[in-house]
Amino acid sequence: MAAVTQLKLNLPSRLSALSLIPALVLMCATICLAQDHEVLCRDGVGTFQAEFSGVTVRVGAAKSGGLSTRACEATLRWDKQTVTVAVNAAQLDLDAFGVDLGLGVPSVAFQVKNSANQCCMDYKIYSLEKPPRLLRSITGGDFFSSADTDLDGRVEIWTTDAAAVDGFENLDLSELDSAPTIVLRVEHGNLLDASSQFQIYFDNQIAGLRKQLNPEDTRDFKSSDGKLSPNTASSADRLHRLRQVKIKVLEIVWDYLYGGRETQAWTSLAEMWPDSDATRIRAAIVDARAHGVLAQVTGVSAAKRGKRVRIFDAITPSSGGKPEVTPPEPILLMRPPPETSSQVSSPSELLVELTIDSAGKVRSAEPTGSVKKDSALLEATTGWKFIPALNAGRAVASRTRLAVSLRQ
């Protein structure tokens, strides 16, 4: 039996419990954007430091007079020189480290939220070479996550068009299930929209939204003016119900539209939106979309899905030799609190086998041995981030095992 590449993790608990999953093995075919996202540094709390090819990346509390403040900063250092990525930010996160995001060089990708009141993150990609260079910035998403979603060797950047829909029809982002999802890919230096290649994801979103629609309320909304002005002669309860329908209809239309199926988007809009307001809302949707993240995109990705990449073994052989690649290292791993008090008598550790893609994201997680599964912990792995395994300095997909403490 192979020995464990021992990352013995005493993971801090999340602030809120995660929903449970029934499956023993967790497979994440797409990015789980609906989950709450943790970041490396929030209000000056949290640190990270790592080195790649002589460039040191640091994320942590901003300093003032030698003392830590309640703000975050990120720097790149090499040969006694420093580049400041961000300073006095409310939130700072590291999405990728040592990953080629389609720009031809190993890169590090930061997420920066300058103010807690700001809706969205700025995504900044720097090269990890001397001297580090800012290769690309993307704005307007409420969160970004790079991943080799299909394990075909191509890295996508998943995000949402949050800035475009924040305040749309006087709706706050917090009222939405999610802002419209966008899947980006960098090819030959160009930022392209690859969303249409992930229609299964959008279909699942649409199916879930349709299930939430009450037929009677949907008919009631269809007969309204669509704008749902507070001055409308309706009860507060009816306005609330119609507002919820309006949100679901918009989200369905957005999922079709952003998923590359414009005809279905407008057909769904015509079916569910008040006829008298359909022309206005369609123009508003088109205008908002044109001024969002897609305004930074130069085209649509036409690349076909590639062959499945090799999954390298990052588990130390039982013979005591070295694994075939440099094992992945954690960037940010969070777990939910223990589910019940009965876990006091359960094993103190859970050994988890992970498949980690070349962007450092978990594609599957499976407990090993006879230990009782921890469903919430397995689901939490969808938000874990790693420095990916390296083969001759190149980020690759890998299989590894982690021993996770269940008590602390």
Image (cartoon, rainbow, N blue to C red):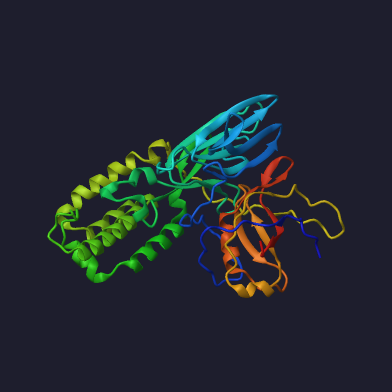
Q: Is residue 393 above or below residue 381?
A: above
Residue 189 or residue 69, whichever sits in front: 69
Residue depicted at x 59% and y 27% = 83
Which picture quadrant has residue 362? bottom right
Residue depicted at x 63% and y 26% = 82
Question: Where is residue 223 shown, x and y percent of the image?
Answer: 16, 62
| Farthest left residue in view | 233
Question: Where is residue 285 shown, x and y percent of the image?
Answer: 28, 47
Q: Is residue 47 left or right of residue 216?
A: right
Which picture quadrant has residue 354? bottom right
Tell me if I can see residue 140 in this picture. yes
On-image quarter of the N terminus: bottom right
Residue 296 or residue 97, whichever sits in front: 97
Q: Is residue 182 left or right of residue 347?
A: left
On-image quarter of the C terminus: bottom right
Question: Where is residue 308 shown, x and y percent of the image?
Answer: 62, 54
